[in-house]
Amino acid sequence: MYKTVAIVVFSVLSLATVSAVVSSSGGNSYEDNDSSDHQYESDNQENGGSWFDSRADIIPSNNETYLSECGDCHFAYQPGLLPQTAWNRVMDVLENHFGDDASLDETSISKIRAYLVENAADRTKQSRSRAFAVGSKDGSALPRITETRYFRSEHHEIPDRFVRDNPDVGRFSNCQSCHLNADAGIYNEHQVVIPGYGRWDD
């Protein structure tokens, strides 16, 4: 009799323990995945965070026409680094592209413009990209990623000697010089390595 009661009590306690563990783990796998996505966006924008460091926080450039026509001359900046109005202004005056003539045939212009606008900072779900769209202003000068409010807030503490006076960097627009995985859309501050100075983590 006592043995049977003991077995029943042990079984009840075991079930209660399993139930508590499942409840504390966050429920089903869908909820886990959903919460992980939210945590990833937050971590990459603010804290970096363990294995999230290796995940893209801006969608990488993947359009062949854009990569070949624009990426041959400079770093293929991801569309998510400027809002759509800014990209349209860039594409409107390719004959005077920041001092250079980057004229293209109409077919290429149309393809590249569509790609940039459809994936622009204000049309994506990526939190870091959305930050690049905040405070964007229209103006007569060509828009620059380095002049966006978000870029300035993220780079204002970096001394000029680390960038402009650094022959291995030269200017703040050379993202790939310090963000070693920039081409993969990874701009996490915990992965910044400034040539000649080492890791930078504010």
Image: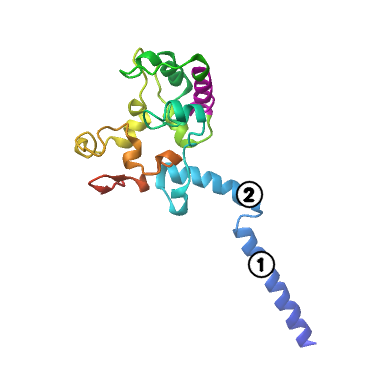
Residue 41 part of the magenta segment: no
Is residue 26 shown above or below 43? below
Q: Is residue 6 left or right of residue 157?
A: right
* Magenta part of the chain: 109-123
Q: Nearer the viewer, residue 23 or 148?
A: 148
Question: Mark 1 — residue?
Answer: 18
Where on the picture, by quarter, is residue 139? top left
Q: Residues within 10 Å of mark 2 (few under 14, many from 20)?
A: few
List x then y, in percent, for residue 42: 47, 43
List x then y, in percent, for residue 19: 67, 64
Tell me the SS state at disc 1. helix
Question: Mark 2 — residue?
Answer: 31
Residue 118 part of the magenta segment: yes
Q: Amino acid at mark 1?
A: Val
Give the residue at x 48% y 46%. Answer: 55
Q: Nearer the viewer, residue 81 or 74?
A: 74
Tell me the SS state at disc 2. helix
Mark 1–mark 2 CB contact (< 8 Å): no
Q: Amino acid at mark 2?
A: Glu
Q: Main structural element of the magenta stretch: helix, strand or loop?
A: helix
The tally of labels here is 2
Q: Nearer the viewer, residue 64 or 116?
A: 64
Q: Quadrant of the C terminus?
A: top left
